[in-house]
Image (tube, rainbow, N blue to C red):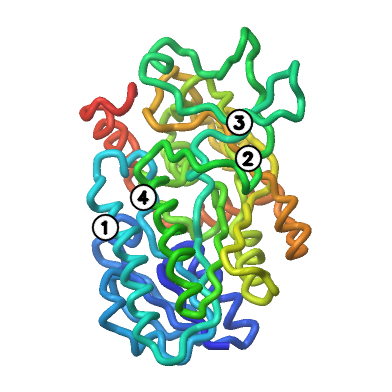
Amino acid sequence: MKVLITGGAGFIGTKLAQRLIADDHSVILVDSLSPQIHGDIPDYRPPEGATFKRLDVRQLAERTDLLEGTDVVYHLAAETGTAQSMYQIAEYVDVNGMGTAALLEALAKLQKRPARVILASSRSIYGEGAYEAPSRPGQLIHPRGRTREQLAAGNWDFSENGEILQAVATPEHFAAKPSSVYAATKMAQELLLTSSCESLGITPVLLRFQNVYGEGQSLRNPYTGVISIFFNRARQGLEINVYEDGKESRDFVHVEDIVSALVLVMKADVAPGSCYNVGSGMPTSLLELANTLVSASGTTAPIRISGDYRLGDIRHCFADISAIRRDLGFQPVVDLNAGLQRFVTWAKSQPEYQDLSDKAAAELRERGLAKV
């Protein structure tokens, strides 16, 4: 098949392209090579066998030739920094929203359109994940985001009638409650695809990724990717600042498992608008992550539970992956310990980049969006 990947020079896009080429597909990669990810002078080399076009996704409506004859489009291009999105609002709305609109306009111009568009969406659209009250097991609760006052008082957890709510796996049918501009733009991408594709005779499929990590992740970008941020600081002997009380949790999924899901959904018989969570299905606290990463890296970097916080950050979210298991036969195979060791081995072979996470945190603090 002929496949086009927007954001194809990124972390996930590169791994996906390598897999598709190995499976004898024809692959076209479209990417702007953003300096935030690739540096001011990109040293990107596309995978052997891929066709690469440096192009901003927002310009895709004028380059329909790139989409001619494609069977499948993977839409991965996006700005992805949750915290950064809270003050670079126009940029996130423009790239993520108008970039998706440009793709759809390009598809509408084609005489022969691809059969399927697969969107890399995000668990962030849920806002907080699912919870239960200990006295009412099985009844899912979906709290709204925490207020500035709650965070300032150190009230990290959610409670109801005097009970601390317990995080449980979040299913796809959970309502969307975006708590960041980034999350709102990912929700907008989903709506744009599902409202447009069927009228064009295209099957849209939505994959809501959890926190993706692994070899090839940008080590330059201080705005996204907590694992790369923690590693850079550990490598340089800098203190690792774990926000809140360190017990906040995320679902970390290795890029190898993400690529497996992307390939499965390309081939599967699924209904238009199908939506699947993609994750490990397991929560990991940020403190546990920091300790495991420091151990794997062989450093002695200090870890501090600071009580700092960022507005818009969620407390807990991990994926219910029963639907993608049932429908596509998906099964994550890379556990976190093995995945972190693979990441560290690769990351140590890369150049040491200046740590810019303090600068990124200061930008939030100056705008009143964080206590750091």
What amino acid type should be assigned to the residue bearing mark 2? Phe
What amino acid type should be assigned to the residue bearing mark 1? Asp
Query: Circle 3: is it few (<14), some (14-19), or many (20+) Cα within 10 Å?
Result: some
Residue 71: horizontal and vertical position, in percent? Answer: 53, 85
What amino acid type should be assigned to the residue bearing mark 4? Asn
Residue 206: horizontal and vertical position, in percent? Answer: 55, 61
Q: Quadrant of residue 131?
A: top right
Query: Circle 1: is it few (<14), some (14-19), or many (20+) Cα within 10 Å?
Result: some
- Which quadrant holds the C terminus? top left
Query: To which residue does mark 4 refer?
Result: 221
Label 4 to label 2, Cα distance in Å?
24 Å
* Location of residue 27 with respect to 356 vertically, above or below: below
Query: To which residue does mark 3 refer?
Result: 285
First-in-chain label (3 vs 4): 4
Query: To which residue does mark 1 refer?
Result: 94
In this rendered view, identify the residue nearer to me: 68 or 287.
68
Residue drawn at the location 33% of the way across and 59% of the way down: 97
**Of circles 2 and 1, which is in front?**
1
Query: Circle 2: is it few (<14), some (14-19), or many (20+) Cα within 10 Å?
Result: many
Mark 2 secondary-structure assignment: loop
First-in-chain label (2 vs 1): 1
Mark 3 secondary-structure assignment: strand
First-in-chain label (2 vs 3): 3
- Check if mark 1's residue and mark 3's residue have beta carbons within 8 Å: no
In this rendered view, identify the residue nearer to me: 89 or 36.
89
